[in-house]
Image: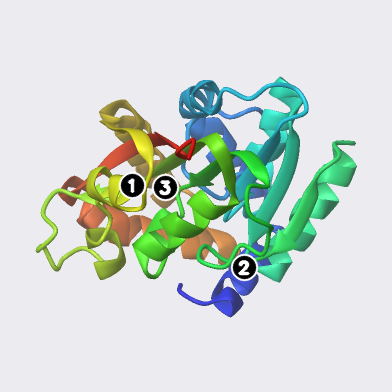
Amino acid sequence: MTSAEDFDRWYADRVESPVADELVSRMLGLPPDLQSTSLLTGTGLDEVVAALNLREGQVLLDLACGRGGYGLEIVRRTGCRLIGVDFSAVAIDQARHRATELAIEAEFQVGGLTDIGLPAASADALMIIDAFQFAKPKLDALAECRRVLRPGGRLVITTWEALDAADERLPLSMRQVDLAQQLPAAGFADVEVTSKPEWRVIEKAFWQQSLAVDAGDDPAMQSMQAEARRVLEAFDLRRRVLATATAPLQ
């Protein structure tokens, strides 16, 4: 999937699939009311919250927020203000609905990784959960992140990187991710990129378990199983990373 229309259909299918949501929540160890469409585990979320280092009232920008699940959970934990941005209008509608269900105040709007649609220096922290690989070009997305972050603001990214950027068995979009080089090139400071093999253990078990489910006529589960086959075929060609950085003070 590459276009907003592709993701609109994917999110529309997902909202009708309690089987997919239950599987994700159980296998990733997430709070039962957190609606995830990513692969960040519960322990991974704990690490992201710590890295963001948010205080009550500060603004968190959840870029490529999907249905808003991780951002809404962080609001509940920290008392921060949440702005969620995604290029799928269907995902944004679902995120707004979920915030209302949970009685959490949050703002959600349509925007892209390279065109967020917010004023400069409008966020204290920014996270991109499992979506940076879709950015085109990567440096333009990071420059846009730096633009909307206040000086000293924290950036946290979870994604995958190819072990060999020349290995064409992986999508080009993933082979172009090299955050240790790209974050400093975009002007970020305090850059740390950490491999997370323990997340990969849970991730692999999740994909394997998804193939054991009877998908029936559930389009969300059918899509998940097709993705599982693609991912597992090249599973050992990539690594899972948690990247943190700081917007410069000047």
Residue 172: % across, % down: 25, 69
What residue is shown with label 1?
A: 183
What residue is shown with label 2?
A: 87
**Does 57 sit left or right of 195 as displayed?**
right
Q: Give the camera-side residue of 217 and 129.
A: 129
- Mark 2 against mark 1, which lies toward the viewer? 1
- Give the residue at x 46% y 55%: 131
Q: Give the camera-side residue of 175 and 211.
A: 175
What residue is shown with label 3?
A: 212
Describe the element under mark 2 as helix, strand or loop: loop
Q: Is residue 198 above or below residue 245?
A: above
**Does 160 sit left or right of 28 as displayed?**
left
Dot 3, crowdedness within 10 Å: few (<14), some or many (≥20)? few
The image quadrant that residue 77 belongs to is: top right
- Contact between labelled residues 3 and 2, with CB atoms less than 8 Å apart: no
Describe the element under mark 1 as helix, strand or loop: helix
Instruction: Please say whether residue 226 is visible from this viewpoint.
Output: no
